[in-house]
């Protein structure tokens, strides 16, 4: 496994995290380390942390360290699943500077399904691993599944794929590979039969939340919405929003300017809702109300 030493400014963050959580071995993955390696001046607030092992003592110790260091436990012990049935326990902790998403799991190195999200930094080694060339993928504006689309809940994969494209300016439909990925995920959702509560309730609602988050994140909202419609993803995960988009003139300059000024999920949800017929609003509202399940996400709760 090839490793590369971390630059000093990321080492400093790793040492801070060690102090906050009191764990001697962990990794940081996701957007923060990637963004910092691409731009040393990137503003980082959210940090995804993975710790090997799921034991009550280890989780309790981490909770206690966080509290001692001034963190509020937004979600102290949330059950989650990756790879369909691999259990994860999550702690969401927040202070004025950081929102920490801390996951306890048996195989931390398995984080990420698309190449862009697989780079991770290690503590105490203070180095990083880029096995699937995440840095090159961001620079080249490409995105590739590296684990297998059948190995994960398709709602979660759509959530990640759409958000990563939005964040890094990757066209949803700009390559044959992306089109095939979205078509395959839509097909997997149409045939999804898992009866576990997490997979039939929480994952679909999280997918809806992620779609709104992606629309807010992207620079050119009009073009992104056109691609969402073309991909037919909304037909499978959120047909009510699809109807709202069909009735919104996203080519109109005034509409585009209004969209560009929207900063919160609540504003975005309200913006699309007003274009729906009364009967379509019923289904739309039912899905939005379910966002309240995500108690750790203030914007989702406010929208619900």
Image (cartoon, rainbow, N blue to C red):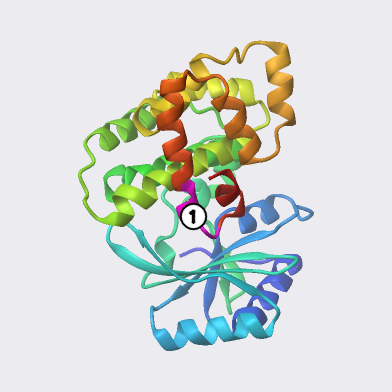
Residue 276 seen in the current view: yes
The quadrant where residue 267 appears:
top right
**Left or right: where does residue 249 sit relative to residue 51?**
right
Residue 82 in percent (x, y) is at 35, 58
Residue 247 in percent (x, y) is at 52, 14
The quadrant where residue 128 appears:
bottom right
Q: Nearer the viewer, residue 84 or 12?
A: 84
Residue picked out by circle 1: 294
Q: In this view, does 47 lie above or below 242?
A: below
Residue 120 in percent (x, y) is at 54, 62
Q: Quadrant of the N terminus?
A: bottom left
Residue 203 in percent (x, y) is at 38, 49
Q: In this view, does 26 lie above or below 150?
A: below
Q: Count residues near mark 1 (Cα–Cα under 10 Å), then give few for <14, some for 14-19, many for 20+.
A: some
Residue at coordinates 54% horizontally, 82% vertically from top-left?
Answer: 62
Q: Which of 303 and 199 is in front in this view?
A: 303
Residue at coordinates 49% horizontally, 15% vertically from top-left?
Answer: 246
Q: Which residue is at the far front?
A: 278
Q: Which of 228 and 276 is in front in this view?
A: 276
**Left or right: where does residue 275 sit relative to residue 197?**
right
Q: Which of 162 and 235 is in front in this view?
A: 235
Residue numbers of the magenta segment: 291-296
Q: In this view, does 300 lie above or below 46?
A: above
Magenta-span inclusion, residue 213: no
Residue 24 seen in the current view: no
**Left or right: where does residue 122 sit relative to residue 195?**
right
Residue at coordinates 62% horizontally, 21% vertically from top-left?
Answer: 222
Residue at coordinates 42% horizontally, 30% vertically from top-left?
Answer: 282
């Amino acid at each position: 496994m090839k490793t590369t030493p971390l630059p000093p400014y990321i080492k400093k963050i790793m040492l801070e995290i060690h102090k906050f959580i009191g764990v001697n071995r962990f990794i940081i993955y996701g957007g923060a380390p990637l963004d910092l390696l691409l731009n040393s001046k990137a503003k980082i607030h959210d940090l995804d942390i993975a710790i090997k092992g799921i034991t009550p003592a280890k989780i309790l110790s981490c909770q206690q360290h966080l509290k001692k260091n001034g963190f509020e436990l937004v979600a102290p012990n949330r059950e989650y699943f990756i790879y369909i049935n691999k259990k994860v326990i999550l702690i969401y902790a927040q202070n004025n500077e950081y929102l920490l998403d801390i996951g306890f799991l048996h195989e931390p190195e398995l984080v990420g399904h698309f190449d862009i999200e697989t780079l991770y930094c290690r503590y105490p080694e203070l180095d990083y691993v880029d096995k699937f060339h995440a840095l090159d993928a961001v620079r080249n504006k490409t995105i590739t599944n590296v684990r297998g689309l059948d190995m994960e809940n398709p709602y979660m994969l759509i959530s990640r794929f759409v958000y990563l494209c939005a964040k890094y300016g990757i066209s949803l439909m700009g390559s044959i590979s992306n089109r095939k990925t979205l078509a395959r995920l839509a097909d997997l959702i149409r045939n999804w039969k898992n009866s576990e509560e997490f997979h039939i309730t929480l994952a679909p609602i999280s997918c809806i939340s992620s779609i709104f988050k992606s629309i807010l994140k992207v620079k050119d909202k009009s073009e992104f919405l056109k691609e969402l419609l073309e991909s037919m993803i909304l037909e499978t995960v959120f047909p009510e929003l699809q109807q709202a988009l069909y009735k919104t003139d996203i080519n109109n300059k005034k509409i585009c300017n209004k969209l560009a000024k929207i900063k919160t999920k609540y504003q975005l949800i309200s913006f699309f809702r007003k274009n729906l017929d009364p009967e379509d609003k019923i289904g739309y509202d039912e899905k939005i109300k379910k966002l309240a399940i995500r108690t750790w996400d203030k914007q989702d709760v406010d929208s619900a």
